[in-house]
Amino acid sequence: MPRLLVVHHTPSPTLDTLLRAVLDGAGQPELADVEVVVRPALGATASDVLDADGYVLGTPANLGYLSGALKHFFDTIYYPCLTATVGRPWGLYVHGNDDVDGAVSAAERIVTGLGWRAVASPVRCTGDVDATDRDACWELGATAAATLL
């Protein structure tokens, strides 16, 4: 059974809303053949990454950059996963108060080094989360899971 790993840093109700939308999208009945594994960024390990077939990452944009938790995740898994995960699909959602470009750019640079391939454009959410943001995260989760079938 293919495995989708969702790694997130969810320190706020806003980010929890986006995470839930990703999980709802990935958990559609027609995607039941994909196992969805959820790990907080500070608890995710290289073994989690190696055992998964694809990834969705979620983070707030803090001071124009990835959360420290997601950066720690990347620091922890980068070298152990560098050659073993090349070509695997990934997606990203980011929330910030007014700007998420630095966080998106940082994540894209890191996964470029890992050789992962994007399944969709990053979901960029700023300010209050609305139905469009929730729908985009739902679609990201569904697309990432469907890619594994």
Image (spheres, rainbow, N blue to C red):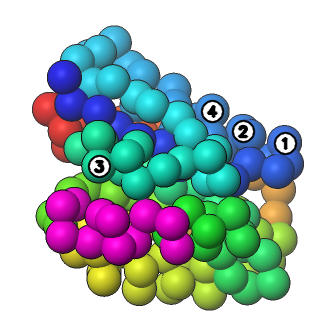
Residue occupying the point 60% across, 72% down: 71
Single out the mark in the foreground, 3 or 2. 3
Question: x and y percent of residue 133 in the render?
Answer: 62, 51
Disc 2, disc 1: CB below 8 Å? yes
- Marks 4/3: CA–CA distance: 24 Å
Q: Earlier in the sequence, mark 3 or mark 2?
A: 2
Q: Are marks 3 and 2 in contact (CB under 8 Å)?
A: no
The tag earlier along the polypeptide, 1 or 3, is: 1
Determine which of the numbered discs, if any, sits on residue 13 in the image.
Answer: 1
The amino acid on which the numbered mark 1 sits, given as a three-letter code, is: Pro
What residue do we see at 82% from left, 51% from top?
11
Secondary structure state at the residue bearing disc 1: helix
Q: Nearer the viewer, residue 8 or 50?
A: 50
Viewport quadrant of the C terminus: top left
Q: Are marks 4 and 3 in contact (CB under 8 Å)?
A: no
Q: What's the magenta bit mostly, secondary-structure-wise?
A: helix
Q: CA distance from mark 3 to mark 2?
A: 27 Å
Camera-nearest label, 1 or 3: 3
Q: Marks 4 and 1: in contact by CB < 8 Å?
A: no
* Observer able to see residue 87: yes
Residue tagged 2: 17
Q: Which mark is residue 69?
A: none
Q: Amino acid at mark 3?
A: Leu
Q: Which residues are magenta?
A: 75-85
Q: Residues within 10 Å of mark 1 (few under 14, many from 20)?
A: few
Q: Secondary structure at mark 2?
A: helix
Marks 2/4 in contact by CB < 8 Å: the verdict is yes
Residue shown at the point (33%, 24%) measured from the top left: 35
